Amino acid sequence: MKFAALIALLLSALPAHAECVTPASLAKGVTFTREDGRQGLIRTEGKRFTIDYAVNSSTAWQDKRQSWLGIYDAEWTWVPTDTYQAEDGPGGTYSFRFATQPPMPAAGTTWDTTVTQRGDAAVRFKLGPVAISQRDRTSYSVNYRFMAETAAKISGCTYRVMPVEAVFKNKTTDLTRRWIYFPDLGFGLETQVTDRLGVGSRALGLTSLTPKG
């Protein structure tokens, strides 16, 4: 075998280098997979991120968000069922308002705020004169914790990561949401929900993260 042919054969046998996510990847989009098996897509849209946590859904299930930094949701369309229903099904479209300006994540810090959630009727109000009742609004006392940075290897690439937790509480809610925030990429993704008063707990750890092909 000629030397050049031997070198080509050896190179072809080497594993391909992983294509890692960079901030520039977000213009086209970054795909990811979580423990529930659903594939997601995050991309920039103005000053926010658009996140579809179930971009490969072939059922009624939806989980689409407009978010600041991926950890402060502004709007959320949530249909937690695989069955199509004409009306009165679970989920809906919600908007969220923070009482104070959300901070940039800084390891070792905390942030307390109030979050007001509005349901379907409140969202429709932006488009026309629809009466809004008190039932359409819910407020939560929220405590964010920004934890120590560490490193995580995902899809063959190593990233700086910062776990972020937020506890949402009111008379009927005691819920902890957890994200993995990537300081070098400028976004976070939800990885766990712990619902202490309901049935909404879910393990959603990231199993892949790659630039959209």
Image (cartoon, grey):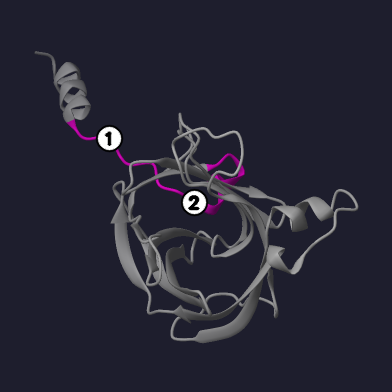
Q: Which residue is mark 2?
A: 22
Residue 178's spot in the image, x, y percent? 42, 67
Q: Residue at x 85, y 58 (%)?
A: 131
Q: Nearer the viewer, residue 18 or 34?
A: 34
Q: Look at the image and give the residue range highlighted in magenta.
A: 14-29
Q: Which mark is residue 30?
A: none
Report the side of 147 relative to 144 (left or right). Answer: left
The question of residue 134 being in magenta is answered with no
Residue 40's spot in the image, x, y percent? 46, 43
Quadrant location, the N terminus: top left
Q: Earlier in the sequence, mark 2 or mark 1?
A: 1
Residue 184's spot in the image, x, y percent? 49, 63
Other-residue count near label 1 (Cα within 10 Å), few / some / many at <14 / 14–19 / ≥20 = few
Does residue 109 sit above or below 158 in this rendering? below
Report the side of 80 relative to 150 (left or right). Answer: right
Q: Residue at x 40, y 79 (%)?
A: 147
Q: Which residue is mark 1?
A: 16
Residue 26's spot in the image, x, y percent? 57, 47
Does residue 117 sit above or below 28 in this rendering? below
Looking at the rendered structure, the kind of residue marked 1 is Ala
Does residue 116 sit above or below 121 in this rendering? below
Report the side of 127 relative to 192 (left or right). Answer: right
Q: Main secondary structure of the magenta part?
A: loop
Q: Nearer the viewer, residue 47 or 178?
A: 178
